[in-house]
Image (cartoon, rainbow, N blue to C red):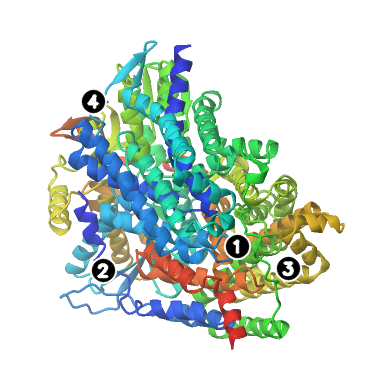
Amino acid sequence: MSFLLVQALSGLATAATLFLVSSGLTIVFGVTRIVNFAHGSFYMVGAYAGWSLIERFGGTPAGFWGSVAAAALMMGVLGAAMEIGLLRRLYRSPELFQLLGTFGVVLVVQDLTAWAWGPEDLLGRRAPGLKGSVDILDQPFPLYDLVLIGLGPLVLGLLWLLFNRTRWGTLVRAATQDREMTSALGVDPARLFTGVLFLGCALAGLGGALQVPREAVTLHMDMAIVVEAFVVVVVGGMGSLTGAFLASLLIGQLQAFGILVFPQITLVIVFLFMAVVLVLRPHGLLGRADEAPPTAPAAVTVPLSAGPHAGAWALALLAVLAAAPLVAGDYALILLTEVVILALFAASLHLLIGLGGLVSFGHAAWFGLGAYGSALLVKHLGAPMPLALAGAPLLAGLGALVAGWFCVRRSGLYFAMLTLAFAQIVWSIAFQWYAVTGGDNGILGVWPSAWAAGKAAYYWLTLGLSGGALWLLRRAAFAPFGYALRAGRDSGLRAESVGIDVRRFQWMAFVLAGTAAGLAGGLYAFAKGSVFPTLLAVPQSVDALVMVLMGGIQTVAGPLAGAVAFHLLEAKVMSMTDWWRLALGLIIVALVLVFPKGIVGFLSGFRRRR
Amino acid sequence: MNRGPRRMKHRHPTASPLAKPLLPAALLAAVSFTTIASTLAGIGLTAAPAAAQSAKEPVSFSGAPVRVGEINSYTGLPAFTIPYRQGWQLALEEINAQGGVIGCCELQVVSRDDAGKPDDAVRVAQELVTNEAVDVLAGTYFSHIGLAVADFAARNKMPFVAAEPLTDAITWSKGNRYTFRLRPSTYMQAAMLVEEAAKLPAKRWATVAPNYEYGQSAVAWFKQLLKEKRPDVEFVAEQWPAQGKLEAGPTVQALAAANPEAIFNVTFGADLAKLVREGEGRGLFRNRKVVSLLTGEPEYLEPMKDEAPEGWIVTGYPWDQIDTPAHKAFVAAYTARFKESPKAGSIVGYITMKAVAAAITKAKSANAEPIVDALSGLTIDSPVGPVTFRASDHQATMGAYVGTTTVKDGRGTMKDWRYADGANYLPPDDVVRKMRPAE
């Protein structure tokens, strides 16, 4: 009994940290609609700044808590600076473009943090006066954790007061519900947003600085927390602070007790929980339908245009690409092969985002499933390459068929997070099912058949298959199917009333996109010779999103240009410097500022102006 | 403590200065033309060779340089890979100062980051082989990346000296003709600890290990080998935290609830620090023996400062206490060169490069097949003692130091240690031959 109580208390301490971080995220998202990928970075830098201050001043209780507060304030200031310098310029950009900007910030912060504090893990000093433990029913329990447990509700209460008892809070709530109306009433939304970013990032920094006495500060803290924070926000219901609190509590307890029943579940428990909640409750635990903001502002109605002579351009491009092996060396060919594969991958995601208005955070699932489909056929059945390649879109399509049925029943960020949950579940299966998938050591020896083993031969094969798939995707975009999909994106209600079964079309689009991504994955497997769970993991999904957004989502060519630009940049910068994340991040931020509609969006705007 | 690694940032040894002006060009090309243009630019750019910078050397060489392509997770895990890089840099400087390889030729290294992803590592390996014309591949830290590069090496018939990956598969179930591994594997390190664990009176054991192949196989070997020596032990609890995401409180509590007499730990890095802190706070280690893999390595022990655990039986690297002349010379040279103390990664990097050079010299050739033949059964004298790459499974006999952790002068270190020679903890040739795929 006493053991269970202490276990529950441990879960509460975990929950407190989770709540502090996710409360900031939910406030920022609720008001600004920004999917702030950099939220975890503020948590990490908050921890580093807290560590430095605590090392210097943390000998006394006043010094310690002052350091924590100072770290939080510093992160708030940084957050406000990010709003003023970057995000403010992007409010008129297409949906989720801010996501790309904050992703650039993540990369920059990773390298700057490593530069400023060095690569070693830093173990900070413990909180003065709270070093020991107390016996709770004969079980020792750290004092500091007790303080954390108290801090969660305290912050919740303060935030509640702030939002319900101050003028600023009222304005923020007003802006959350109706941005346009609030600014029409004379409230400067820009200043409001700056304040919100300050608050949100300060909360992240507070969460980070409070971790210093509990754990080592590392360069991996940002990615570890940001995904979980999103889970909490979505499970709780977006924009709902109480929801985030409740979700943190539940997740904390689940983790505490889950490992007692089934220790191996640690990889996936959070995402399983999110999937179950989202399947049962469309708007999270405490979110309400009318408060659920769409991820994509409905204002985006620019029709997808093919552009004049698109067919001729495509053929010319294909001809040039097909001729590439005549002049390009082996490595250039390999890079081109990858670019072509990633272009298909990005285009398949674009089908969902651009046409369906469905932003997927878990598109790597289908890419990876395709790769595993091929690799498993090779490993277990000794299948020849053509057969194994055929298995790739099949397995991915099947997976998308099942997951899609659940996902299309949700919209906006709930859809996005449900796709992420499925991707993580697939990932954890690949990661842990050693007998079949080889676990994290993956499947080796997935090399092409002899006739396609040459770099040029495999490149042509990739070009042919990807080109065909891209052509099909393009056909779909301009077929009645594509128009129905776009109708559902722009006005679901009207589309339904003219007899379009929006959900079914979205489901079909999901399966089509998954199948195409699966083909790309299969081709990728044979290009690399091995398959690992990393192909299914979050960074792969993020890469796809970045490629689509970089190119611009309002044109069919956008994702292709994005894939080319992103992959070549990454490969090139990576081989030149260890500071490639800094360079790549700065380039992305610059791109976002210079081309707020994506590369191709910018180019077509340019063409129109001329 | 940050100063050392920070200095490194400005001394990136192998990125070509010539290539740097290409960055704006790459950006321009990638963003300012249409898809066609940027694709074409991509071809042009990637075909452009990034010339490798040769180390400034007074020694003159009569032959063409021999080139090593080096890949590691420099951005993914800088805390472990940067000491490793400094180690091989030191070795490289020594080798070239002493006349290079084969007595005639400069040894050059082209180093690349793999971003912590196996598919990126394979691409980088390809770039090194085709664009940089390297003769040998070396490096890698993560097991899955090591395996991916090993498979690439076999396919492209390139010698590959895997420095740090620990998985048994790389030399056994997935072993191949072209791949050799330096560091003692998971099996070897587990076997070294079992020897000590079997001497303990403890019968009830609990395990805690990161939830991936390294953790799983370490626990599996530990259980199997300990049961062979001590049929009376039982394993009463196991915890599998996700790597990097240990929920310290609940995990510690769950371990304590099983009331084990001893604990086998495989977690490392930030997870280990959390486990130790929370475990001390909750009395998990009171009256319990802990046997812990790798914890004695300075990478993991030193960040914990005076909170380093006391009395754990570990494998590690007590660099400040090893007083063989060879090792003292290594420490002196390393400290003089980098103004910081060596880590376990440093010695691994150092020996890796020395082994590569020795193999090339023994082969008297920069060609793949002679180098592979030379690596098979190659013995070199290293700061830790003689190391042989076994011909049977390509595993080096580099050992590890087994001892007990303690805190001295406010920092964690090892005491009562001994060098466990890897040769004594490997299955015999005929056994491992059966584990390897037929060639």
Q: Answer yes or no: do the residues labelled 1 and 2 have beta carbons within 8 Å? A: no
Q: Is residue A97 left or right of residue A196?
A: right
Residue A524: which numbered mark, if any? 1
Q: Amino acid at mark 1?
A: Tyr
Looking at the rendered structure, whether the residues under marks 1 and 2 are on a common chain is answered as: no
Crowd around label 4: few <14 · some 14–19 · many ≥20 (10 Å): few
Q: Quadrant of residue A123?
A: top left
Q: Chain of mark 1?
A: A
The image shows residue B229, relative to residue B36, as above or below, that is: above
Foreground mark, 4 or 1? 4
How many marks can you see? Answer: 4
Looking at the rendered structure, whether the residues under marks 1 and 3 are on a common chain is answered as: yes
Q: Answer yes or no: do the residues labelled 2 and 4 have beta carbons within 8 Å? A: no
Q: Amino acid at mark 3?
A: Leu
Looking at the rendered structure, whether the residues under marks 4 and 1 are on a common chain is answered as: yes
Q: Chain of mark 2?
A: B
Q: Amino acid at mark 2?
A: Val
Q: Amino acid at mark 4?
A: Gly
